Amino acid sequence: MSMEVVEEHTNNLLGRREAKLVVHHEGAGTPDRLTVRKLASEHFKSPIDRVFVRSIATRTGGSSATCMVEIYTDAKAADIVPAYLKNRMLPKDQRVAKKKTEEEKPAAPAAKAPKPAPEKKAEAKPAEKKEEAKPAPAKDAKPTAGKEQKPAAAKEAKPAAKPESKPKA
């Protein structure tokens, strides 16, 4: 596996060097972040704990990966790196994110448990509504008749519009 530096520039404000690397991996899959990190730390002669891989991209069927790498001047400057990137630099069995998602999942079913209680209350209310519903239709009979006439007029207008559009086609 070989590596070449395509671009490199120094970011003095953040105390790091930013480099774009091309890692050639003929006959093998895309290299993982740990491998790229080791290659970059050897090439730039800096400790591995100050090298962070931002991204690795390989074109489909290609045998070279384009990598974005950040090399920090000291450990204090490396504190600016987000936690999720630091987590990605760890081996898969040591990553933290999987444990957090498992802890959050049991909290969600606990929120679902109180929902059946409101359904029982809803069952009790329809019995009361049935008694109230008998006088209500007599009062609402006149307004609903007026409402039925309006949609009927709208329905008549729609079919009239459809036959006009069919002959045009």
Image: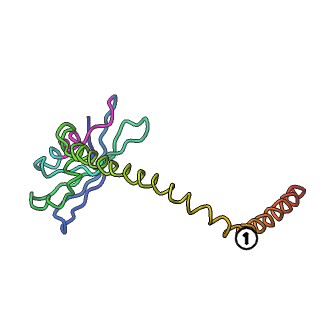
Tag 1's secondary structure?
A: helix
Task: Residue at 22%, 46% (x, y): give it.
Answer: 103
Residue 62 inside the magenta-drawn segment: no
Task: Tell me the quarter of the image containing the N terminus.
Answer: top left
Answer with left or right where residue 79 lies relative to residue 125: left
Task: Give the image location of residue 98, x and y in percent.
Answer: 24, 43
In this view, the residue in front, 88 or 32, is 88
From this view, report whether residue 150 is shown above or below residue 79: below
Answer with left or right where residue 2 lies relative to residue 162: left
Q: Magenta residues? A: 28-40
Task: Give the image location of residue 4, x and y in percent.
Answer: 27, 45
Q: Mark 1 points at which residue?
A: 142
In this view, the residue in front, 47 or 117, is 117
From this view, report whether residue 150 is shown above or below residue 168: below
In this view, the residue in front, 8 or 147, is 147
Task: Residue at 47%, 57% (x, y): give it.
Answer: 125
Q: How many labels does the image show?
A: 1
Task: Give the image location of residue 135, x and y in percent.
Answer: 62, 65
Task: Give the image location of residue 70, x and y in percent.
Answer: 22, 55
Answer with left or right where residue 131 lies relative to residue 59: right
From this view, report whether residue 129 is shown above or below residue 24: below
Mark 1 surroundings within 10 Å by alpha-carbon count, few (fewer than 14), some (14 through 19), many (20 or more): few
Task: Tell me the quarter of the image containing the C terminus.
Answer: bottom right
Name the chief secondary structure element in magenta: helix
Q: Which amino acid does label 1 sit on?
A: Lys
Q: State the image quarter where residue 78 is shown.
A: bottom left
Residue 37 inside the magenta-drawn segment: yes
Q: Which residue lies furthest to the right in this view?
A: 167
Q: How is the image coloured?
A: rainbow
In this view, the residue in front, 51 or 88, is 88
Task: Residue at 21%, 64% (x, y): give it.
Answer: 11
